Image (spheres, rainbow, N blue to C red):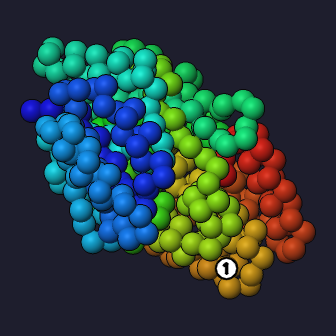
């Protein structure tokens, strides 16, 4: 059995996938690298995947599937994973070699000591193209470092500080037990990936190393703001799926419930602010319908989100209110370095 499975979703990724795969190879026989070609047509992604499978048998495996989107590539990786632990690394990202060694040593230690670890957290670095300073997302205030803990040990998450796909390594069987199945042909499913399994996570370990390098800067990247606006329906779909996963009022313990509600808060905010920044009446109507739908289905959650700071900010009345909300978003965007 492998210690760690990496799923690398690839779609027309020939230009940059080698850097990603090469950064994972130092794991040697302890890891498997599932290179999932999601029906690439414009380049030789599949040929590169098969090249690595031939060169590194038992470590790299090329999997070809009909185009199903990023989520289906992750599903395929999870279905085929032989590792005790599972991590997704997007094909334009990479990992830090020194931090990688520490990650493997930590996972190995838990297995050797027969201790169950559901979620390993590490820092990640925004490798934003053209940025002089690299922003690091860490969890210093949220989790005790280098000790096994649970949700009751969580301290404080800052605004904008969330567990993302880049920062998490999950126990494979725990993911399967959670029933995780990401929707096909949908962007932004990484939010579901980190949200849906959380009630199944009982043990957490925060390793304070800058492991994952998250590249931002390609014009065709899904987190580019204009592309996000163009795909706003998918953002709404993912948010609706997350809202339907659980009734947060039933989530225990309280600190996990608070975190999950805050995650829904940011998802509602993203949908709302993208609708505002699109400037179209159609998208503003979608925003209105999303909030109305939440009110009808879960009034306590609606009141919690709508009366909170972010809910009020994105629902300020009139054109002037939308202008204020958009301006606040731009300030946050510059400060936190996203998009």
Q: Which residue is mark 1?
A: 283
Which residue, as the protein is rendered here, is positioned at the far left?
1
Q: Residue 303, image x and y in percent?
A: 60, 61
On screen, residue 2 above or below 46: above
Q: Residues within 10 Å of mark 1 (few under 14, many from 20)?
A: many
Q: Residue 185, image x and y in percent?
A: 39, 72
Q: Residue 178, image x and y in percent?
A: 24, 51
Helix, strand or loop at mark 1? helix
Q: Quadrant of residue 24?
A: top left
Which residue, as the protein is rendered here, is positioned at the far right?
320
Q: How many marks?
A: 1
On screen, residue 121 above or below 296: above
> Which quadrant would the N terminus be assigned to in this image?
top left
Is residue 255 visible from the viewing direction of this image? no
Q: Residue 309, image x and y in percent?
A: 71, 51
Answer left or right for 305 relative to 330.
Answer: left
The residue depicted at 86 percent of the width and 65 percent of the height is: 323
The residue depicted at 52 percent of the width and 49 percent of the height is: 263
Pick the front one: 16 or 159 = 16
The residue depicted at 17 percent of the width and 54 percent of the height is: 79
Q: Quadrant of residue 220?
A: bottom right
Pick the front one: 6 or 323 = 6
The residue depicted at 47 percent of the width and 20 percent of the height is: 209
Q: Quadrant of residue 64?
A: bottom left
Is residue 323 visible from the viewing direction of this image? yes
Answer left or right for 199 relative to 298.
Answer: left
């Amino acid at each position: 059995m492998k210690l760690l499975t990496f799923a690398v979703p690839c779609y027309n990724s020939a230009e940059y996938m080698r850097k990603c795969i090469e950064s994972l190879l130092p794991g040697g026989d302890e890891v498997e690298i599932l290179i999932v070609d999601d029906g690439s047509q414009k380049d030789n992604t599949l040929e590169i995947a098969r090249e690595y499978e031939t060169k590194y048998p038992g470590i790299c495996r090329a999997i070809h599937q009909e185009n199903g989107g990023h989520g289906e590539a992750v599903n395929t990786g999870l279905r085929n994973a032989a590792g005790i632990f599972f991590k997704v690394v997007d094909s334009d990202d990479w990992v830090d070699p020194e931090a990688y060694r520490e990650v493997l040593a930590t996972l190995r230690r838990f297995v050797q000591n027969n201790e169950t670890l559901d979620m390993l957290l590490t820092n990640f670095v925004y490798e934003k193209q053209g940025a002089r300073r690299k922003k690091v997302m860490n969890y210093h205030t949220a989790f005790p470092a280098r000790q096994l803990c649970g949700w009751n040990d969580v301290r404080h998450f800052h605004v904008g500080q969330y567990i993302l796909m880049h920062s998490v390594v999950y126990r494979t069987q725990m993911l399967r037990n959670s029933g995780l199945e990401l929707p096909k042909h949908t962007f932004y499913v990484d939010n579901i990936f980190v949200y849906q399994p959380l009630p199944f996570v009982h043990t957490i370990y925060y390793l304070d190393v800058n492991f994952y390098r998250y590249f931002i800067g390609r014009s065709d990247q899904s987190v580019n703001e204009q592309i996000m606006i163009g795909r706003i329906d998918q953002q709404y779909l993912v948010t609706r799926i997350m809202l339907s996963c659980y009734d947060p009022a039933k989530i225990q313990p309280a600190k996990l419930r608070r975190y999950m509600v805050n995650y829904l808060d940011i998802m509602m905010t993203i949908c709302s602010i993208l609708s505002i920044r699109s400037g179209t009446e159609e998208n503003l109507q979608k925003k209105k319908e999303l909030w109305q739908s939440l009110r009808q289905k879960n009034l306590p959650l609606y009141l919690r989100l709508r009366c909170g700071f972010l809910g009020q900010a994105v629902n300020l009345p009139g054109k002037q209110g939308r202008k204020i909300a958009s301006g606040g978003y731009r300030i946050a965007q510059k400060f936190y370095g996203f998009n």
